[in-house]
Amino acid sequence: MKRAKNVWAFGDIAGKYLLKHSANLEAQYVWNNISGRKKKVDYWPMPHAVFSSPQIAAVGYTEEELKEKGVDYVIGKHYYRGTGMGLALDEKDGFVKMLVERKSRKMLGCHIIGPDAASIIHEAVVAMKAGLTADAIAHTVHIHPALSEVVQRAAMKASKY
C-alpha cells in the first residue's frame, strides 16, 4: 500500500475490514493523527456478526488459524440449552465456542451461533482487548437467567484444562 504524508483514509478505502464499526474506529485514529497524536490503528480484537437467523458472531482467531500458527489452545464450548435463558427460549442448537491459549489462559477467539450472538460476543471482545483470561470470565458473577451465562459456561469449560 502506498502512503502519502498527511493523508489519512478510513472505512472501505482503508481496506482492512469492510465493517462500519471498523470505519468508526479508524475515524477516531484519523482524528487523533490530524490532532498530532499519531498512532497506528489497533484493530485487535475486531468482532463481526451476521444478522441472520440464527445470528452468528465472532472475534479473534479461528481454530484453523491457530492450528496453522502452531498455537497450543483449548476449547470451551457450551450450548445455550445448558442455561436458564436458553431453556426458556427453547434454543436447541445455539452455542458459544471459546478458544483459549493453554498456558497463558488468554482468549484467542470466540464464536457464537444463536439468539443475540451479536450482543453477547462483547463480553469476549472486552476481555480480549483488556488482555483478560478466560478464567476471569469464568469466575465473574453473571446474572441469572441472562444469555451471558452461556459465555461464562464456555469459559468455565476452557478453564478446566
Image (spheres, grey):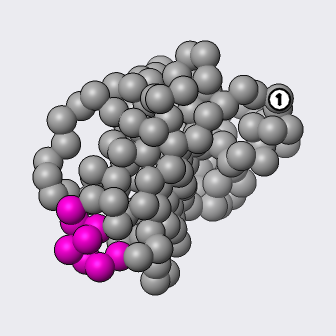
**Residue 128 in view here:** no
**Residue at 54% across / 27% down in the picture?**
161
Q: Secondary structure at mark 1?
A: loop
User: 92 or 30: which is nearer to us?
Assistant: 92
Q: Where residue 152 sits in the image (x, y, percent)? A: 33, 43
In the picture, measured across the screen, residue 131 lies left or right of residue 85, that is: right
The quadrant of the picture occupied by the N terminus is top right
Q: Disc 1 residue type?
A: Gly
**Residue at 58% across / 56% down in the picture?**
11
Q: Where residue 109 sits in the image (x, y, percent)? A: 57, 42
Query: Which residue is the site of mark 1?
Result: 70
Q: Where residue 49 sits in the image (x, y, percent)? A: 50, 64
In the picture, measured across the screen, residue 142 lies left or right of residue 158, that is: left
User: 22 or 147: which is nearer to us?
Assistant: 147
In the picture, measured across the screen, residue 35 lies left or right of residue 83, that is: right
In this view, which residue lies farthest toward the left? 144
User: 135 or 55: which is nearer to us?
Assistant: 135
In this view, which residue lies farthest toward the bottom? 53
Image-quadrant location for residue 154: top left
Above or below residue 139? Residue 2 is below
**Residue 84 in view here:** yes
User: 93 or 98: which is nearer to us?
Assistant: 93
Q: Is residue 87 magenta?
A: yes
Highlighted magenta segment, given as a residue range:
84-91
Above or below residue 73? Residue 80 is below
Q: Is residue 60 magenta?
A: no
Q: Residues within 10 Å of mark 1 (few under 14, many from 20)?
A: few
**Residue at 64% across / 54% down in the picture?**
17
